[in-house]
Image: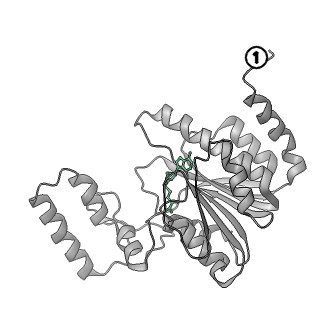
């Protein structure tokens, strides 16, 4: 298992990596392309180097995945054994569709088993076996749009939603937590008992309220950083399993409805 995704050209082995090996010929080819790209003085050389040296990018291309992110879901699932044939899955922040492709394969929706509904704020190309929606998930109409596409209760809500990062750690935390809170609220509305919630977070951003809520409404919750997640990135995944059911979550949904009403001041 090899990963040199640090972008520094170093080769490291990471436990649980979905990528077994990168063939040496391909490596040689990559090095040549990096050199020639540098030779042509492409302005985004660092980004390009990282892409060309990243085995996940190459493997995603080889296997026809739309993004390297696909491997994050594969690795999370290899580790925790969560997604199964016949499940109904909602995929938030789905574009360009790597997670959606993995989810379709895992539930078997191309063979008429289970269901996958994906949504992204960006326009994205449809995928066989999935319902691909375009909307801002923070738009109050978005949850209903997803619910209308669903054929029944959901087994897993998975969110790889990520705001455009500003580089300002605290701002980025606040933005992603807002997305995760909305995703969690939605999950609490649509999940069947026993359901699963997976969401991308930035490290240090899920303490206190959010984590307490997850702990209250799900039997097991943990954070994980799959090998495909770049080591230098603050991202990690919140994984919650064993949803305790709608009644348990009803208070949170009601409180969130109250918080939406701007006309009220908080009572000390
Ligand atoms: C890391 S990418 C997702 C990659 C995807 N999981 C894959 O495997 O290809 C994060 C996505 O979150 C989406 N996103 C960010 N804010 C959003 C919002 N408010 N509503 C819907 N999607 C959003 C972005 O447009 C972006 O496509």
Vertical arrangement, residue 265 with respect to residue 235, above or below: above
Q: Count the marks: how many?
A: 1
Quarter assignment of residue 23: bottom left
Asked if one can make out residue 78 in the rendered structure from this viewpoint, the answer is no
The yes-or-no answer for disc 1 within 8 Å of ligand 1 is no
The residue closer to the viewer here, 132 or 188, is 132
Q: What residue is drawn where x is 67% and y is 42%? A: 181
Q: What residue is drawn where x is 40% and y is 37%? A: 167
Q: Secondary structure at mark 1?
A: loop
The residue closer to the viewer here, 216 or 91, is 91
Mark 1 — residue? Answer: 265
Q: What residue is drawn where x is 46% and y is 35%? A: 169
Instruction: Report whether 252 appears left or right of 160.
Output: right
Vertical arrangement, residue 31 with respect to residue 40, above or below: below
Instruction: Report whether 100 appears left or right of 192.
Output: left
Vertical arrangement, residue 158 with respect to residue 127, above or below: above
Asked if one can make out residue 35 in the rendered structure from this viewpoint, the answer is yes
Task: Work out which quarter of the rendered image holds the N terminus and state it.
Answer: bottom left
Q: What residue is drawn where x is 18% and y is 69%? A: 33
Q: Position of residue 65 (x, y in %)?
A: 45, 72
Classify mark 1: residues with Cα within 10 Å, few (<14), some (14-19) or many (20+).
Answer: few
Q: Position of residue 56 (x, y in %)?
A: 40, 68
Task: Work out which quarter of the rendered image holds the C terminus and state it.
Answer: top right
Quarter assignment of residue 53: bottom left
Q: Position of residue 12 (x, y in %)?
A: 36, 65
Question: What colour scheme does the image use?
Answer: one colour
């Amino acid at each position: 298992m090899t990963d040199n995704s640090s972008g520094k050209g170093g080769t490291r082995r990471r436990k649980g990596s979905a990528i077994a090996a990168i063939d040496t010929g391909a490596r040689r080819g990559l090095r040549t392309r990096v050199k020639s790209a540098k030779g042509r003085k492409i302005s985004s050389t660092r980004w390009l180097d990282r892409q060309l040296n990243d085995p996940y990018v190459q493997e995603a291309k080889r296997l026809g995945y739309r993004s390297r992110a696909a491997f994050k879901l594969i690795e999370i699932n290899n580790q925790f054994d969560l997604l199964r044939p016949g499940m109904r899955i909602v995929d938030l922040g789905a574009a360009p569709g790597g997670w959606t492709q993995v989810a379709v394969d895992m539930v078997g929706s191309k063979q008429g088993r289970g269901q996958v509904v994906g949504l992204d704020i960006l326009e994205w190309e449809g995928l066989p076996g999935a319902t691909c929606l375009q909307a801002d998930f923070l738009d109050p109409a978005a949850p209903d749009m997803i619910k209308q596409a669903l054929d029944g209760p959901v087994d897993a809500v998975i969110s790889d939603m990520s705001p455009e990062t500003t580089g300002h750690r605290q701002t980025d935390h606040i933005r992603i937590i807002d997305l995760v809170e909305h995703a969690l609220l939605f999950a609490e509305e649509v999940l069947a008992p026993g359901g699963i919630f997976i969401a991308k977070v930035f490290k240090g951003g899920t303490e206190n309220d959010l984590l307490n809520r997850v702990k209250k409404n799900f039997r097991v919750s943990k954070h994980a950083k799959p090998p495909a997640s770049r080591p230098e990135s603050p991202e990690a995944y919140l994984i919650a399993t064993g949803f305790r059911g709608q009644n348990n979550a009803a208070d949170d949904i009601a409180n969130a409805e109250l918080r939406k009403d701007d006309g009220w001041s908080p009572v000390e």
